[in-house]
Amino acid sequence: MPINTNKVNQKVTVLTGEVLFEEGSPCDSLNILHKGSLLLEKKIENRNIPLIKLTGSHLTPGILNLIQNSRYSYTIKAIEDSLISTYQGSSSSIEKTITTKLSLGVMIAKTLLKEISETFKKNNHIRALSAQLTKFSDNLSIVYYQLAPSFFPDINPQGQVDHPSDDVIDPILRLTRENLHHFLYRGGRLPEPPTANFLFEDRGALLLKEYIEEIEIDDKEFFFIRKILITESKVQNPLFEADPSILVHICTKLTDVLKSMLDKFEEESQQLNQGMEMFFAPEKGMLEKYYQILQFQESGISETTPEILSPMTEFISDKINGFLNMYRNIFSFDYFNISPNVNDFQERARKLANSLKAQAKGTQEGTIVAGINIESVKKDLEGSALKIMTFAKLSPEKVKEFSSLLIKFKTMKNPLDPEPDARKIRRNITKTYWEIYENCFAKYMNDKNIPKPVELMLKYGFFDETLLEDNQFIYLYTLEDKTRNNPIVPAHSGIEWLESIYQKKIVTSIDEMGQTYFEKIKMSTREVNYKRESDVPPEVDTSLARLQHELVALYAPNARLTTGSPASHVPILTKYHIVIPLDKCFVTKKQLSDTLEEIMHVDVTAFNREVIYNDEELGILKEFVQKQIIPDFILVPSIGGKIMMWQDLSVFRGSGAKESRGRIVLPIFVTGDLKTMLMEAIAAFRWELCKSILGADWNNVGIPSITADYTDYVQFFKKSRDLSIEVKEKLAVELKRFRNDRDKFVHDYLHWIKYESDGVPRVNKVVRNMFYRHIPFSKEVRDRVSKLPAFAEIHNRFTNIRKRQYRELENKYKKYSNQTGFLPKVLQDNLDFYKV
């Protein structure tokens, strides 16, 4: 029975299980816990969910609601015999109490801080489970299509997958269609064949989702208050005694933070329950779909083979227990809305796995080059890890430590698991791996005759033959890119790039913080004031120093980021990363070059910029001309579905800076659609280059540019007269999916190049007008789309502007013509650029 607060209760005993205050009841007392333990429970969807425990003394349970003059936000009950006092109070009287009894005020503040801390931890546990469950269900939905394609007769994975219509009611069928739409549109490639490995990775970038496992508090004032409250009382007391209103403000602020935490708890709990329902629900959950596939398998009418299905159902079976245990640990009770077929699913999955025995690893097709002595290859690569570490001259202690880490990695059931222990192992492996890589590359620069395992590591990230299937490392052993790229496309293998850095043929890259090699040198040699990079002596600016910087600045970060799943990254190539046969995802220089040319055939100004041209002999001074400067494309030893636009310029100061090449980094094994991934990188390159060229005016609408016009559009589209109410409402929802304006621009750019260039409408009228002006198609494409009503008016406007610009330049350039009427090539090319 709840405590009667109409009277003062001095140190009354509350027995275990008794409720002190019920959620929703009026809060009209200041409560002080002297001894014991209380549980705070919050009701969500008609269930009392344990929130936090308050144990000990000098605590004021329920103070949040007294200060905010609100009803109890949670039920408070004793979970062991407790001693408590209550005093009648109100929101107005508690402020006076805090200012007159500072010790009580500090007790209140510390109680609030404790509740915030515990609720924050609880929210993070919920978020972690929710993120893992959502990521797993999303990956399962994509594989579900491959295992049961007959349920999606209208879908062609080689073409466009439309958003599901309102007629699709089944939640899993709808989720599958939504995810396939985004996955394929943004360049994802379906695993061939589907494997359990595919279920590990984070594909949020392709699905336009974020699986964030940790919540952050972005409140500087809160952290400042926290610092004050955890200091010693001899520091706090003089502050509060000098101005008691500071303590009142602290308590008020903490109640606001706690209230938001409780709201977040409710939101996260509801979201988790939706995810649990999506996976576990009877009849319409994801688990039921895979249970149905298992039944089809047993009846002999399955659309897949048991060798493909078994590893996935076995993995799902393990995940079932993990998810249910995590839920129980968070909420102290079992999840309720669960399919009755869970146990039967696990039993069938186990039987299927046992029946397959050695075949339970699944199949992984690959290319084995004819004429190769397989036993010879295996012998050459046997003990590769030790051979590489020996070549790198790693110390015996580090060899022992690294070997121990590799053993732990190999024995993990899921080496790419997002759990903290697995992350720690991968992080430690990564740190030592790059030390080994650096040592091996430095020796390679002195003598190109290196052991085969070392060569495969430098080229492809190979390290241990036991981490790959036989057909995979045999393919790597024979792999060599003998193709040639178009000379206008500067494509580099990872080794070629590092060689150029080591030999000082090209400038080093910026790091993840945007710092240059020279800036890092200045920071490490503060006692010497180098004003220019040329001031750095050769004994400091060594080839090895440049190599070390490049590995840390560009190489290692991009080997991680190009995977598309940084959280599960390990730089060693393993069978767990390979969801598509290596021979089908290896990127040759010719393939890269050809794909770029396809894009540039549509987006002719993809790599154009306006630069200043001077030729004193001909009297040409400060003429602005269009110039195509294609970035360096660097293929790093990585496997994944992300291409990184690393730098829009390679030189940032001095003459020639704005004519320097950018840097775009690709994984050597691309698991997505190369063309789509390149489009995304080019869009990001366009955006960043425009910002660098224009400087502070990048978003100044008074100086028209793609960045200024697009940011203006995003900010004010709701006021546009050219957009209907329906379009505005749709945009308001769609744009929230993207983190920043650049991501929004990339999304529209994909529509522009993929569909609008073929006359298929995908962007709205405002974006179409803007892009036709700033990102014009090639003449061939313009002539084709100009016949369509949506393009007719903007094409005429574009043509008239270009003709006017052409006439102006033609008249201006007459003074530069020679006696035969010919212009210098640079000016002639610029004039031809404006010809329509």
Image: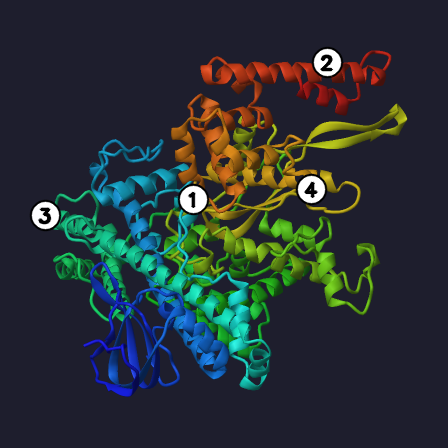
Contact flag, marks 4 and 1 (Cβ < 8 Å): no
Q: Which residue carries the number 4 mark?
A: 696
Give the mark, 3 or 2, whose residue is nearer the N terminus.
3
Give the mark, 1 or 2, whose residue is nearer the N terminus.
1
Dot 2 lies on which element? helix
**Distance from the alpha carbon under mark 4 to that under mark 1:** 27 Å
Q: Which residue carries the number 1 mark?
A: 737
**Distance from the alpha carbon under mark 1 to that under mark 2:** 44 Å
Give the mark, 4 or 2, whose residue is nearer the N terminus.
4
Contact flag, marks 3 and 2 (Cβ < 8 Å): no
Q: Which residue carries the number 3 mark?
A: 299
**Distance from the alpha carbon under mark 3 to that under mark 4:** 67 Å
Q: Is residue 626 left or right of residue 135?
A: right
What residue type is disc 2 on?
Arg
Give the mark, 4 or 1, whose residue is nearer the N terminus.
4
Q: Is residue 483 visible?
A: no
What residue type is disc 4 on?
Ala
Q: Which residue carries the number 2 mark?
A: 807
Contact flag, marks 3 and 1 (Cβ < 8 Å): no
**Distance from the alpha carbon under mark 4 to that under mark 2:** 31 Å
Dot 1 lies on which element? helix
- Label 1 packing within 10 angstroms: few (<14), some (14-19), many (20+): few
- Give the percent coordinates (x, y) of residue 391: 57, 67
Label count reads 4
Give the mark, 3 or 1, whose residue is nearer the N terminus.
3
Q: Nearer the viewer, residue 480 or 822?
A: 822
